[in-house]
Amino acid sequence: MNASRVAEFTFLGLSKSRPIQLLLSILVVLSYAATLLGNILIILTVHIDPHLLKSPMYFFLANLSFIDTALVSVVVPKVATDLITCGRTISFGGCMSQLFFLHFLGGSEMLLLTLMAYDRYVAICHPLTYTTTMNRPRCIRLLCFCWAGGLLHSGSQLLLVLRLPFCGPNEVDNFFCDVPQIVKLACVDIRVTEILMVANSGLLSLVCFVILLISYAIILTTLQGHFRESGGKALYTCSSHLIVVSLIFVPCLFVYLVPLFNTSVDNLASIFYTIITPLLNPIIYTLRNRDMREAMSQVQKKYICPIVAPQKKI
């Protein structure tokens, strides 16, 4: 950082038209509020309902909602503030912090989604040993592994950036700080850095995505011919997970596996995994999951809108 002469970065990914900025600020604030509300409601519902809390699937789902809540808070408040105040800059330290937490939470989420696929695989393909295999202590250890993996991934990404000298220009062709756009501003040849970035973020996304596809291929093969029994419900749950996986991994593969891809495509993909996906996750899991809908309904009746029946006089 001491070798860096750039004190701040300027975002070019935001519109310069004031009416469009105001419109986007309203949309961003509304989407942020809806994301917080949906994910926090899932977390509260899982922790309030004893039946859901004991289930590994919903235990992991609550942690996924927590990551989504934190992930959207890394980028969206800064974007909303810039749109409202016409700001377009971020300090070097703020940029590095944004980059670190974005990859820390994003890497942890990818590993968690892979863990959730493994949980469904054990539940469907090995139901007799599911309770002992996915007991609570083991679930906590696996969850800690996801967080540790995300930390290792993020730390290595940050080191890749901090070792580069930045002496200008300082214009980032995006609306937040991310590795592919930041490394292009370095004053040295970045070909080796881009290879390392692909080996880190790109391969992490690709490997997790391939494992997920293989897991669900095995699950679908196991469920074949049993849709009329319990397979239908399992397939319904897995389809929700597959939708979430596609929304997260496909944009990340575009951004990190091919670092020299079209910038407009990168920006569009960035919008998906930083704003849209955390917003859609609660909707997908609640609308396509009957147990979650029923539990949320009970929580709403009991805690949010309680109906106090009049007491009878004796």
Image (cartoon, rainbow, N blue to C red):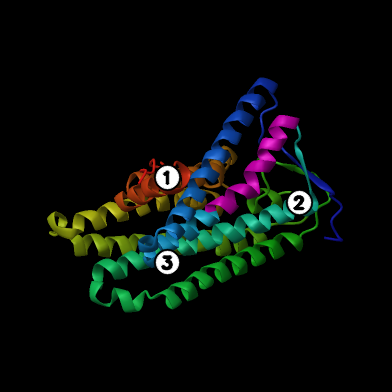
- Separation of marks 3 and 1 at Cα, in angstroms: 30 Å
Residue 263 located left or right of residue 114: right
What main secondary structure does the magenta stretch of the protein show? helix
Sort mark 3 into few (<14), some (14-19) or many (20+) by Cα contacts within 10 Å: many
Mark number displayed over residue 115: 3
Residue 141 is one of the magenta-drawn residues: no
Dot 2 amino acid type: Gly
Q: Which residue lies under the disc numbered 1?
A: 300
Residue 106 position, x and y percent, is: 55, 57
Mark number displayed over residue 3: none
Q: Residue at x 53, y 56 (%)?
A: 66
- Separation of marks 1 and 2 at Cα, in angstroms: 39 Å
Dot 1 amino acid type: Gln
Mark 1 or mark 2, which has the lower sequence index? 2
Q: Residue at x 56, y 51 (%)?
A: 69
Report the span colored magenta: 68-85
